Image (cartoon, rainbow, N blue to C red):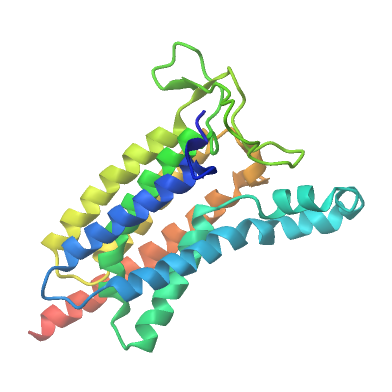
């Protein structure tokens, strides 16, 4: 486990944040490459999405924890303030970032009267690439870890303590992977799948002129991927309600919305062709 990458001017540079920055830079470069010279500068829209994504990523988990805090208020009120805030605000959730980023993109397109679907198609491959690189940061930091597996499992990883690292959280529920236990390297598996997905989406974007196809493909494929991988996650702190986790319920909704949009756009596309 290497949550701290290096120190500069006496300040620790955390690996997770470093890979998020690298992912954002890679996403921006891919975005510019796919946009081409004929398109307008996409940087303002990208900046808006990043801001909205950060807000959403930080806000979703606290919103999900409100019922727990209300139900167990007597327990939480006895915590030191810094421990409570570390537990309540100390996590970043991808689906929250996706919701925040999509909301920011919709507002941006509405403000500047830009068609939403073509812009969403453009952003989808970049999103998958940024997410994939960010998952490498999860692996280095020891969060979002997998279930225990046999030491001989081909995808087994064992996390070791990092003496240079500060505790990831002061909360009583630890979000870091258990030390010395063979775990499924789910972060790296998801990272590889997401980078492959980014390549598929980039090719789809370049090969088709059908608005909405690329972003719908992203929604369908990623929702299925995330739904399946959630069964192999060992960090139960993310929230499990009934049969599924929070992310699996959101995955079901994302799949349904993407499928409905794909069907709708298919009907629109057929009507346009029939008029030609």
Q: Residue at x 54, y 38 (%)?
A: 144
Quarter-of-image position of residue 257: bottom left
Q: Is residue 183 above or below residue 219?
A: above
Residue farthest toward the left in the current orientation of the protein? 276
Between 31 and 225, the one nearer to me in the picture: 31
| Above or below, 15 relative to 23 | above
Q: Looking at the image, how many numbered discs can be counted on the residues?
A: 0
Q: Is residue 221 visible?
A: no
161, above or below 144, in the image? above
Instruction: State the image coordinates of residue 79 (x, y, percent, origin top left).
Output: 86, 48
The quadrant where residue 214 appears: bottom left
Q: Compare residues 237 and 6 and report the one nearer the observer.
A: 6
Q: Position of residue 60 (x, y in %)?
A: 60, 60
Q: Position of residue 237 (x, y in %)?
A: 66, 41
Q: Residue visible at 27% across and 66% down?
A: 121
Residue at figure coordinates x 18%, y 70% from the top left: 210
- On the rendered structure, is 206 left or right of 172? left
Q: Residue at x 44, y 74 (%)?
A: 104
Q: Quadrant of the C terminus?
A: bottom left
């Amino acid at each position: 486990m290497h949550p701290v990458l290096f120190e500069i001017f006496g300040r620790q540079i955390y690996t997770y944040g470093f890979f998020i920055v690298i992912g954002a830079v890679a996403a921006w470069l891919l975005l510019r490459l796919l946009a081409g010279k004929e398109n307008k500068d996409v940087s303002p829209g990208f900046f808006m999405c990043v801001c909205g994504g950060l807000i959403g990523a930080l806000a979703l988990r606290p919103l999900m924890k409100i019922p727990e805090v209300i139900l167990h208020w007597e327990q939480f009120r006895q915590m030191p303030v810094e421990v409570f805030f570390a537990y309540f605000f100390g996590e970043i959730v991808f689906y929250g970032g996706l919701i925040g980023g999509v909301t920011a993109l919709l507002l941006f397109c509405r403000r500047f009267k830009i068609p939403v679907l073509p812009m969403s198609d453009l952003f989808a491959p970049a999103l998958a690439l940024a997410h994939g690189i960010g998952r490498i940061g999860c692996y280095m930091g020891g969060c979002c870890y997998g279930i225990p597996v046999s030491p001989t499992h081909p995808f087994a990883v064992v996390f070791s303590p990092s003496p240079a690292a500060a505790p990831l959280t002061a909360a009583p529920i630890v979000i870091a992977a258990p030390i010395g236990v063979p775990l499924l390297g789910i972060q790296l598996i998801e990272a590889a799948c997401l980078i492959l997905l980014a390549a598929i989406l980039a090719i789809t974007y370049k090969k088709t002129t059908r608005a909405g196809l690329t972003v719908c493909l992203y929604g369908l494929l990623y929702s299925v991927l995330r739904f399946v991988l959630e069964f192999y996650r060992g960090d139960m702190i993310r929230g499990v309600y009934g049969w599924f986790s929070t992310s699996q319920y959101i995955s079901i909704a994302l799949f349904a919305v993407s499928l409905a949009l794909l069907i709708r756009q298919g009907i629109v596309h057929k009507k346009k062709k029939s008029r030609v």
